[in-house]
Image (cartoon, rainbow, N blue to C red):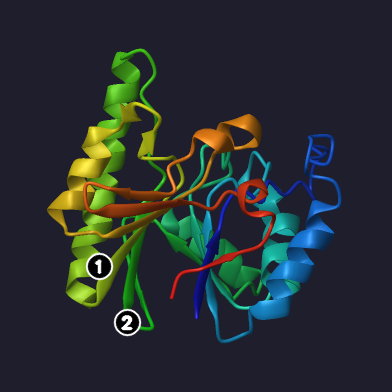
Amino acid sequence: MIYTIGDLHLSLGCDKPMDIFSGWSNYLERLEENWNRKITADDTVVLLGDHSWALKLEDSKKDLEYIHSRLNGKKILVKGNHDLWWQTMNKMNAFVESNGFDTIRFLFNNAYSVEGIAICGTRGWIRENGEPQDIKILSREAGRLELSLQAAAKLGGEKVAFIHYPPIYGSEENVLITEVLHKYGVKRCYYAHLHGASVRGALNGERAGITYKLVSADGVGFDPIQVN
C-alpha cells in the first residue's frame, strides 16, 4: 500500500519544539501510534516536506534516523520550504547510505514506480502580491515538476503528484504548477504546508479534473492518508 503525510517538523537534533502550538501536544506519540498501527515494512509512505528543522544535512541525522527506525515502511521524501538541510541528490543519498537509513529515498527531479503508481512531485511555491522573485521560483519549480512527470511517464501507470505547497488555495491558483499537472494528465494531487486556521481554506476535492487532498500532519490528525 501507499500512504502520504506531510509536515512532521521534527526537531530531535535541535531546540524547536512543536508541541507549543495548538493541536500539536504529544504529536510524536500520536504519529507513531497511528502510523505503525496500519503501515507495514512492505508499505511506502510519501512524506510531503518540512521533515526536519535542521539547518545542515549533518544536523538532520536524528530526525532522519527517527523516520527510518521508528516509523514502519519505505519512505519517499519531498522537499518542503523549511528543509534548509536539503542538498543535492548525490549528497543526500550518500548521507542516508553512510548512516544505514535504507528505508529513505528522495523525490527530486525524478519519479518512482510503486505498485503500479508513478510517484512524482516537487516542493512548489506560492505567489504573493505578484513579486518577481516568486514568479522566478515558481517557474523553476514547474520545471522540476515537469522533469519528475517526464520520468513518471517512462515508468508507466497512473501519475500521482505530491507537492509540498498547495497548487490552489482560495482564489489563488499557481497556474505554472497546475498547467504542468494538466499537461501530463495528472488526476490526483496531494499537498501539505497548511496548518492551524489555514486548514479550513484547503481544497479537498476536484477542480478542473484534478482531485486535490491536503495531508499536512495536523490537518489529518497525525494519521497518514491511504493513496491506493
The one of 114 and 188 positioned closer to us in this rendering: 188
Identity of the residue drawn at 63% across and 31% down = 197
Q: In the image, which disc is placed on residue 195?
A: none
> Tag 2: residue type?
Gly
Q: In this view, does 199 lie above or below 46?
A: above
Quarter of the picture containing the C terminus is bottom left
- Measured as percent of width and height from the top left, residue 136 is found at 28, 26
Residue at which label 2 appears: 116
Outermost residue, bottom side: 42
Q: How crowded is mark 2: few (under 14 residues within 10 Å), some or many (20 or more)?
A: few
Kindly report which numbered mark, 1 or 2, lies closer to the viewer in this rendering.
2
- Measured as percent of width and height from the top left, residue 69 is found at 73, 73
Identity of the residue drawn at 17% across and 59% down = 185
Residue at which label 1 appears: 152
Displayed quadrant of residue 131: top left
Number of disc labels: 2
